[in-house]
Amino acid sequence: SVLVQLMGFPPTEVLDWDIASDARVDWNCVDERLRSHPVEASIPLQYQYGYVNPQSPLELALLNYETPVPVRTISSFISAHPGSLCWNTLATAAVRGHASTEAINFLLDSVPAEIAKNIATQFLPEAVEMKNLQAMRALITRSSNSLSPNGCILG
């Protein structure tokens, strides 16, 4: 889709995930495309290999390291396709994504509190292992039961 191309990927059906973190993205153009062609946010992604298997354009956006996706664009993705805010998307943000703490908090605030707490409890240890500081900051405040009395992360 044009949306995926705007996110730095070639116009092929199989995406090379090595490009995901290095793409320089003009998120204003992505926002514009989401407003004019919201259906593109719902087109499932096909993938060939790798341990990260994004299923939606939003998940793909969360993998970008070079130009992390801003909150306004995450909001545009969710407005265009509310179904993209799913467990996989939250897991990508919490563990392998490169979104800011603000963006991760926005995602977690967009789901019921119980789901956000479950995400935090399940993925905080992985975020620590992956050294994802932004995710740790967002998750630790929602998962107080993941901390021992002396402040060490359990799990």
Image (cartoon, rainbow, N blue to C red):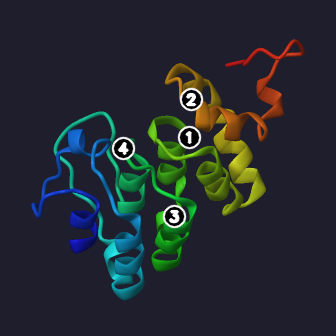
Q: Residues within 10 Å of mark 2 (few under 14, many from 20)?
A: many
Whichever of callouts 4 and 2 sits on the residue coming sooner in the sequence is: 4
Indicate left or right for 115 with 18 as reference: right
Q: Position of residue 100 (x, y in %)?
A: 57, 46
Q: Residue furthest right?
A: 149
Q: Earlier in the sequence, mark 3 or mark 4?
A: 4
Helix, strand or loop status at disc 1: helix
- Spatial CA distance of label 1 from label 3 is 14 Å
Query: Residue at the location (28% across, 46% down)?
Result: 20
Question: Given the image, on which type of amino acid does mark 1 rest?
Answer: Ala
Mark 2 → mark 1, Cα distance in angstroms: 6 Å
Q: Nearer the viewer, residue 99 or 57?
A: 99
The label on residue 127 is: 2
Residue contact at pointers 2 and 1, CB within 8 angstroms: yes
Identity of the amino acid at label 2? Ala
* Residue type of the residue flagged with mark 4: Glu
Q: Which residue is mark 4?
A: 66
> Label 4 crowding class (10 Å Cα cut-off): few <14, some 14-19, many 20+?
few
Image location (x, y in percent) of residue 108: 66, 54
Q: Earlier in the sequence, mark 3 or mark 2?
A: 3
Question: Disc number at residue 94?
Answer: 1
Which mark is drawn over residue 8?
none
Q: Position of residue 69 (x, y in %)?
A: 46, 55
In the rendered structure, which disc, 1 or 3, sits on the residue that comes first in sequence?
A: 3
Disc 3: which residue: 74
